[in-house]
Amino acid sequence: MKNYFISGDKSDCFGCEACVQICPEKAVIMKSDEEGFRYPVINKELCVNCGVCEKVCGKQRIVEENIEKKYVFGGHIRDSEVLAESTSGGAFSAIVNSWCKKDYVIFGAETEGLKVKHSYITDKNEIKKFRKSKYSQSIIGTAYTDAKNFLKEGKKVLFSGTPCQISALKSFLGKEYDNLLTIEVICEGVPSPIFIEKYVEFLKKKTGSDVLSVDYRFKKIRKWDFQVMKVDFADGKTRMKDRWFNDFWVIWLNHLMSRPSCYKCPFTTANRVADISLGDLWGVHLYCPELYNRDKGASLVVCNTLKGKEAVKEAENIMDGHELDFETALKYQSPMRKSISFNPDRDNFMKDLVSDMDYIDLCKKWGKHPSIKLLWQKYIWGNRQKMFVWRVRNYIAKKGE
Ligand SMILES: Cc1cc2nc3c(=O)[nH]c(=O)nc-3n(C[C@H](O)[C@H](O)[C@H](O)COP(=O)(O)OP(=O)(O)OC[C@H]3O[C@@H](n4cnc5c(N)ncnc54)[C@H](O)[C@@H]3O)c2cc1C
Ligand code: SF4
Ligand code: SF4
């Protein structure tokens, strides 16, 4: 992957905003392109050709080999309310709770309407706004500069984000800080925000009510692995759709609308940029069924540094789970092995998405109904049913001992 300032190729830009933040002349701004992804634009009148934007961009794509032995944990936070409000097993909240004792600042992604942006909090009781995966690239704003200022003041800084954002923060800082803990989500890309905007517009027209919020991974009814999207309306009504019937998931996970850089992301390797990588414990029913947790959500926690391991070891006091083998976990986590493959239909889909084709026609053309086989596998004989049988067998075996 080349430096975007040299290649000018959009697929070389993660939209991390390090170049915007580092420019002393404020000559670089981010602008959305027609697909809804943001890219830097240099104001030639303000630019003094100092080259720092190019330098920070070049450094930001280097993934160093992790030299410390990885420590991997699988499990979930014990607090059932926090678990229900978290995407996976609530590992993020458990680590925040344990690491942030005094004089700390926490950075994360929050929603503002349909927009996602980075911000910080100085009171961990406000952590709820950072919980839950928002499947849209967050706007960094001044987060890297703010984090640097807090670090220089000696505050403990916990910074969470996608791997490209964590790498950008490190490149922006230019040196290691003992008082910084970085947490990345295991990431397979970000979708164009235009799809969800079209969906919301369609819902508004159909129901006559404004959409207040979109929760991409609502867990309280169908639970964790159904990836239920819940939309809340101003008139108090709600609408929910399981992943298999939701064209957002179908189209995105078919790699039709990801950011160009995500198809050749350098961060999708076993070498990670953050102290801790967090993901869903996919494959749980296959290699550690005791952690399935009745579909309430389970986290995969990969510690890439000693600092990360120490933070997670402390967080384990408020979690249930156990150590896992890294190589086995890796088998079920493709974003830690390779980037998503380019779908040759992507450009045709994107043309339709940005045209005035309405939401229904778009879904008719590009969405997919689940097959009978898939419905059978998910609803009749799915992980939940298999886990139920596993529990009963276990119970009988234990009674017979
Ligand atoms: C865009 C995206 C893609 C992902 N892809 C995968 C995947 O392919 N496989 C996998 O196993 N896990 C993936 N995850 C991670 C997973 O969904 C959970 O975020 C993770 O397991 C943490 O869950 P939790 O229960 O510990 O905490 P939660 O409390 O749910 O933690 C949320 C954390 O995610 C951060 N976050 C939320 N939205 C964004 C955003 N838009 N940009 C940057 N940071 C954000 C918050 O700052 C916080 O640190 C992805 C997450 C995102 C945001
Ligand atoms: S620093 Fe980030 S936003 Fe700027 S050009 Fe490079 S990858 Fe793109
Ligand atoms: S896949 Fe890579 S480039 Fe895309 S958002 Fe995730 S970390 Fe960034």
Image (cartoon, grey):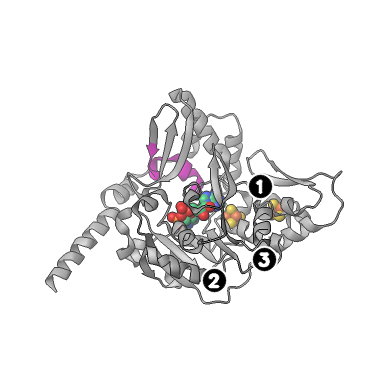
Please state the horizontal and vertical placement of residue 35, each as a whole percent of the image: 63, 40
Dominant secondary-structure state across the stretch colored magenta:
helix
Q: How many marks?
A: 3
Q: Which numbered disc, 2 or 3, marks the residue closer to the eye?
A: 2
Mark carried by residue 62: 3
Mark carried by residue 267: none
Instruction: Give the residue number, with chain letter if any, for mark 1.
Output: 141
How far is mark 2 from mark 1, CA to CA? Answer: 27 Å
**Which stretch is magenta?**
240-253
Q: Is residue 285 left or right of residue 191?
A: left
Question: Can residue 156 be seen in the rendering of this structure?
Answer: yes
Query: What is the secondary structure assignment of the residue under circle 3?
Result: loop
Instruction: Give the residue number, with chain letter if any, for mark 2.
Output: 307
Along the polypeptide, which appears first: circle 3 or circle 1? 3
Ligand 3 is found in the corner quadrant, namely bottom right
Query: What is the secondary structure assignment of the residue under circle 2?
Result: helix
How far is mark 3 from mark 1, CA to CA? Answer: 23 Å
Along the polypeptide, which appears first: circle 2 or circle 3? 3
Along the polypeptide, which appears first: circle 2 or circle 1? 1
What kind of residue is marked 2? Lys
Q: Quadrant of residue 222?
A: top left
Q: Is mark 1 within 8 Å of ligand 1?
A: no
